[in-house]
Image (cartoon, grey):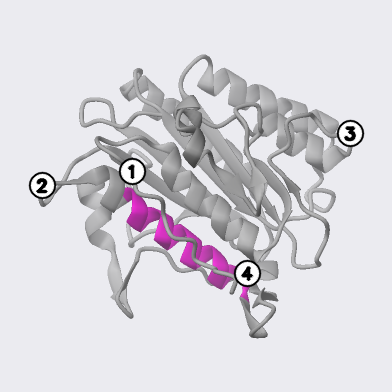
C-alpha cells in the first residue's frame, strides 16, 4: 500500500467510544498493572499516528502530504470527529494539517483522547467511513486506503443479523471495488476469552465469520522480506491471513494497531515500531 505526495494514502480509524471501554483490564500481569480499555486505545492510536509521521510523512525536515487522516469515534447516537475541534469538510485532513495538531504529553505526541460514554453506533460508524472512503477514491482514484476498526461491542446487542452483515459486506465491496484497500479489525474482550488471531480460513462462528468477511488480507510488500515477516502475539502471519482479531487482549490490541502503521509504504526503509506494551 504505497503513499506518495502525488497519490496520498487515506488512513481511517473508527474507534468505539462507548461506556464499556471505560472498563479496566490487566495490561501487565507480572506487575499487576491495570488501565481502561479507552486508555489502551488512546495509547495505541497515538503511537501509530506518530509512527506514520516519522516513517512515512517526514522527509528532510519537512512534512510531506503522503497520509490523509480521518479519525472517528462511534459513541452514543453519533459518529464524531476525533482530532481537534472542527470536522474537516472532506472528512479527512492532509498530513501537514493533522501532524501539527499533536500536543506533548510527557514527551509523547498526543492527537487523540477518548472519554467513554453511551452505546456503540458501530453500523452508523461503518456507513459513515465508507461514505468518506467513496469521496476519497473519487478525488484520488489511484490512491490506497486503510480502515482500522477498534471495538469491544457485542454484535448481538447491536442487532447484527445475517442480513445486516451481508449488506455491510456488499457496501464495503461496492465502495472499494478493485482499488487498493486494507481493513484491520480488532474486536476487544476484557473477559479473557480465547483470541482468534488473523485466521486463514473462514470460521463457522457467527461473529468471527462476519469479521473475516469484513477484514482483508495484508499487503504483499509486508511479506517480501522473509526475515521480517509480521507476527502478532507470537503467531506468524501469512499472505492469506485475514487482518482481524476476535477477543483481542491488551497486548494483541496494541500490537495490531502498531502493525497498521507498517501497512503504508513511504519512501525508504521502514524501522519496526516498538510495541507499546512489553512483557518482561
Residue 30 sits in quarter: bottom right
Q: Which residue is mark 4?
A: 37
Compared across the picture, whether 275 is left or right of 251 comes to: left
Sequence order check, earlier mark of 3 and 2:
2
Quarter that holds the N terminus? top left
Considering the numbered disc 4 on the image, is that residue within a helix, a strand or a loop? helix
Does the magenta portion include 240?
no
State the residue position of label 3.
204
Q: CA distance from mark 4 to mark 2?
A: 37 Å
Q: Residue at x 21, y 31 (%)?
A: 5
Which of the two marks, 4 or 1, is nearer to us in this view?
Answer: 1
Q: Main secondary structure of the magenta part?
A: helix
- Residue under pointer 1: 270
Of circles 3 and 2, the one toward us is 2
First in sequence, mark 3 or 1: give its number. Answer: 3
Residue 17, given in percent of the width and then of the height, sits at 59, 62
Residue at the front extreme, as displayed = 227
- Image mark for residue 60: 2
Task: Look at 45% across and 32% down and name the residue there.
Answer: 225
From the viewer's perspective, is residue 189 above or below residue 171? below
**Viewer-nearest of discs 3 and 1:** 1
Which quadrant is home to the C terminus?
A: bottom right
Amino acid at each position: 500500500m504505497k503513499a506518495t505526495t502525488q497519490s496520498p494514502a487515506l488512513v481511517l480509524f473508527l474507534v468505539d467510544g462507548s461506556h464499556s471501554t471505560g472498563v479496566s483490564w490487566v495490561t501487565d500481569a507480572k506487575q499487576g498493572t491495570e488501565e481502561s480499555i479507552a486508555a489502551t486505545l488512546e495509547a495505541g492510536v497515538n503511537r501509530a499516528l506518530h509512527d506514520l509521521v516519522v516513517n512515512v510523512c517526514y522527509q528532510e525536515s519537512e512534512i510531506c502530504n503522503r497520509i490523509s487522516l480521518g479519525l472517528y469515534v462511534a459513541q452514543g447516537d453519533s459518529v464524531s470527529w476525533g482530532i481537534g475541534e472542527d470536522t474537516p469538510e472532506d472528512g479527512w485532513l492532509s498530513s501537514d494539517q493533522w501532524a501539527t495538531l499533536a500536543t506533548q504529553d510527557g514527551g509523547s505526541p498526543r492527537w487523540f483522547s477518548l472519554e467513554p460514554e453511551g452505546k456503540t453506533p458501530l453500523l452508523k460508524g461503518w456507513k459513515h467511513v465508507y461514505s468518506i472512503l467513496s469521496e476519497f477514491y473519487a478525488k484520488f482514484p489511484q490512491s490506497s486506503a486503510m480502515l482500522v476498526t477498534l471495538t469491544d461491542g457485542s454484535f448481538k446487542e447491536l442487532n447484527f443479523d445475517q442480513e445486516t452483515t451481508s449488506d455491510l459486506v456488499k457496501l464495503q465491496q461496492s465502495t472499494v471495488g478493485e482499488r487498493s484497500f486494507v481493513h484491520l479489525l480488532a474486536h476487544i474482550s476484557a473477559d479473557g476469552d480465547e483470541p482468534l488471531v488473523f485466521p486463514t480460513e473462514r470460521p463457522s462462528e457467527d461473529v468471527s465469520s462476519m469479521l473475516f468477511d469484513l477484514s482483508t488480507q495484508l499487503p504483499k510488500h509486508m511479506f517480501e522480506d522473509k526475515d521480517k515477516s509480521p507476527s502478532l502475539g507470537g503467531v506468524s502471519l501469512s499472505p492469506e491471513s485475514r487482518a482481524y482479531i476476535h477477543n483481542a487482549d491488551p497486548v494483541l490490541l496494541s500490537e495490531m494497531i502498531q502493525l497498521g502503521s507498517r501497512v503504508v509504504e513511504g519512501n525508504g526503509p521502514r524501522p519496526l515500531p516498538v510495541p507499546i506494551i512489553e512483557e518482561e
